[in-house]
Image (cartoon, rainbow, N blue to C red):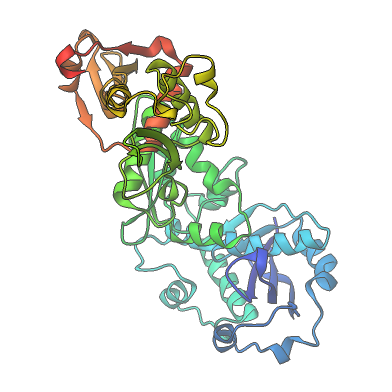
Amino acid sequence: MLYAVVDIETTGGYAAANGIIEIAVFISDGLRVVDEFHTLVNPYYTIPRFIESMTGITNEMVESEKDFKSISDQLYELLHDKVFVAHNVNFDYSFVKHHLQQAGHDLNCKKLCTIRLGRQIIPGLKGYGLAKICNHLGIEIEERHRAKGDAAATVKLFHHLLQNDTNGHVQAMLKSGSKEQFLPPNVPAAEIKKLPSNPGVYYFHDKKGKVIYVGKAKNLKKRVNSHFSNNKPNRQKQEFLKKIYHISYRLTATELMAFILESTEIKKIWPEQNRSQKRFEQAYGMYYFEDNNGYLRLCIEKKRKNLKALYTFNLLAEGYSLLRKVVTGFDLCPKLCFLQSSNIKCQSLLEKKCKGACEQLEPPKKYNKRVLQCIAHLETGLPSFALVDDGLDKDEQSCILVEKGKFYGMGYVPSDAGIHQLEDVKNYLTPYIENDYIRGIIFKYAERFPYKKVNFDLPKSAS
């Protein structure tokens, strides 16, 4: 078996928008170097000053060099049938694969990471960066932060690891289906192996243990592995993988509970790598106000932070659908509710369905009484129900509770406890802070699976 030990210097941290300025490849049979390749590369990108100062490679040094495409045929022939080895292999591999792909070559190699191997074969070191591990082993790096110097040191490190691999870690990593080739350099494989195939929420932690990402899953093992199975060359992906050191999780009985827990955890922890739900807010709300003639008017508007909405919606169509229902149900004027243009005659008045508030034929006090009844219905007449499903084990059932149209909380109820009275169910549940996103997914789920829904009739005094 032949190994290609690779090191590169680049203009930045991710392949999609950065170039390679130097590459070195040492071909090893596991005992000695049998071939080597090294060159500076013209990236057609300006080399940032901090890269110049770190590597010593300047724009002037590369401007007369060949570009990557010019060396791509030779490089592909050198790499394609070898095991690709590097210190933090997914970084180097993502750059080389991306730029070879741009040049018309599809590189697919097995990979070995000397950071991950170092953790397995030489456990207990304070750090596994190239300088630290080489210093521990007495390996000299002749030109630090230059591709040839770092690659030559990585070869010596790799040979040492091969010779001391008494437990077969290298062969285990190279086995078909091994996750070791795809994992970020700092994530222990044991934490991946212990993940269950159940629904739940997973947490990615940084070096200090801080949660940087929260995700939900129908299958925790499958979902977490999916983060690492594609090595996209964009900055977000590369920075994300670099920061992950540990993984923890919490089981839930159902995928819906995982959705809810994820949302509440994101709002509570505010992880730096979560973006979508940080920004999520229902876009529209139903509001009411009194006009100059004393009539209370309902309207659908973009959600306003300083006003309390009677109801909120993600889609404008949802808002108007509910507004039409209450206009019909409480004999309100569609024109005063902005369902008809103010420039035309009220269609409902012509059809004798409107009582004339739009023409001031009905006194405000009489019309407003019905509007207030409508508002009371929206505030207190919303449904109370539970969604009941399987529990974490056969002795319990999961329960998600909605009270008066708002998410109350969730938890687990003993299988022999009947779910009949709302107050009794609450004793088993953990209350959660509600938000529009959670309420939306619960109501959609209830519509999709009505047989899992248990309705509660509230006492008249509470309705």
Identified at 39% across, 42% down, the residue is: 202
Identified at 81% across, 57% down, the residue is: 105
Asked if 37 appears above or below 299 in the picture, the reply is: below
Asked if 38 appears above or below 211 in the picture, the reply is: below
User: Viewer-proximal residue, 141 or 91?
Assistant: 91
Asked if 69 appears above or below 289 in the picture, the reply is: below
The quadrant the C terminus occupies is top left
The quadrant the N terminus occupies is bottom right
Viewer can see residue 198: no
**Where's residue 308, x and y in %?**
30, 41
Which image quadrant for residue 398?
Answer: top left
User: Viewer-proximal residue, 132 or 383?
Assistant: 383
Identified at 50% across, 38% down, the residue is: 223
Q: Farthest residue to the front: give it.
A: 361
Which image quadrant for residue 433?
Answer: top left
**Where's residue 204, x and y in %?**
39, 50
Tell whether 461 sits left or right of 349.
Answer: left
Viewer can see residue 380: yes
Q: How many marks?
A: 0
Tell whether 316 sits left or right of 22.
Answer: left
Identified at 39% across, 68% down, the residue is: 127
**Where's residue 445, x and y in %?**
44, 22
**Where's residue 78, x and y in %?**
78, 64
Q: Farthest residue to the bottom: give it.
A: 60
Tell whether 429 sits left or right of 112.
Answer: left
